[in-house]
Amino acid sequence: MTSFKNKLDKELGEAPRFSQQLQERILHNVVQQNKQPRRWQYPMVFIGAVVTILFLIVIGPWKQVDLSKHATIIELAQHEVKQFTSAYNWEEDTFKAGRTGWILGQQSYKNDSETKLIANTLQKAVISKKDDDYYAYRDVWVEFDNGQVVQLKMYLNDELLAFSDRHTNIFYKVEDADTASAFIALMRKDDKDISFGEMVTFLIIALFLGLLIEIVIRKKFSISKEPKYINTGHQRTTYIVKFIEGAILILMNLYGWFIYIAAISGFLAVAMISSIAIDYYYGREEKRHYISIGLFIMSLVLIIVFIIYFS
């Protein structure tokens, strides 16, 4: 070792390779790094998961209907109707209407002529035995001035109208032909459903805009695309957060929460904020969080457009 050192000194000289000032700075940095406590590498995993779960619990759709004073629609029809909403739904075991501004793709009715029409329709309803010739057509959510609400499945048989109370399972037929025809005409006039083609088109536009915004921001701030992850901690954090978001999406699909505007908006907001936080935490020197911020702003605009168009 001594022989090798001597040969190296002859080649490079015996003068110090680092100045005294540089040696002191290196030593100071090493000491400071050793003193710093080890940071938890996954700060946003816990925060993002907890916030998402709490948010979904708060906006839970099971809190929409008060069943403590539930009565027949014939009794409820004696009260004035405050408002009602309607959504196209031919499925027997699901319900897609609710409070105004709460459900995606529904129509809201608050005008006096509309509320009086449904009140008159319900007053003409008679308890009957369910006929197999009737098919499910729409969901109707009605709020009365006493605070009571009722969820009705609307059935049709040519120009015949019937309702089924979702919570009492009582079947009603509207025997007044003129009233039934007027209500059916109102529902058909505002008949609207979100088609698969419209959804695919909207998603393609969103993906294209997202890609365009990312390209522009990367070019503007000279943000490199590779390496994709700063370090192992960045990669693990991203994978864990994506896994949690995927699990939540599966739960939302199983429980039918995609029709709730608050659920969709809340999930997207938490997902985008988590992405911004992770990129800032691991890649703020490279300004990687600028991309997440740009995509977040774009998502907000698209959510607003989506709600306005499909509501």
Image (cartoon, helix red, strand yellow):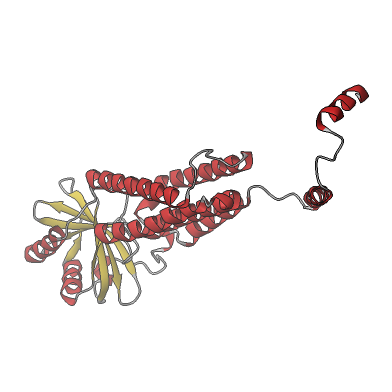
Who's the residue at 79% across and 51% down the image? 25
For the C terminus, the image quarter is bottom left
Where's residue 264, x and y in %? Answer: 40, 55
Left or right for 251, reference 210: right
Residue lying at 41% horizontally and 45% vertically, measured from the top left: 254
Q: Position of residue 176 (x, y in %)?
A: 10, 64
* Observer able to see residue 277: yes
Q: How many marks?
A: 0
Task: Place residue 261 in its image quadrant.
Answer: bottom left
Q: Position of residue 86 (x, y in %)?
A: 24, 61
Question: What residue occupies the far right of the structure in this picture?
Answer: 2
Of the 4 image quadrants, the one containing the N terminus is top right
Q: Quadrant of residue 294?
A: bottom left
Residue situated in front as seen by the camera: 206 or 173 = 206
Residue at left 20%, top 72%? 115
The answer to whether one can see residue 167 in this image is no
Given residues 189 and 90, the one toward you in this image is 189
**Residue 114 quadrant:** bottom left
For image coordinates 47% across by 52% down, the residue present is 221
Specify whether 256 is left or right of 248: left
Q: Is residue 4 above or below residue 167?
A: above
Residue 118, percent from left and from top: 19, 68
Q: Residue lying at the far left in this picture: please name it.
A: 178
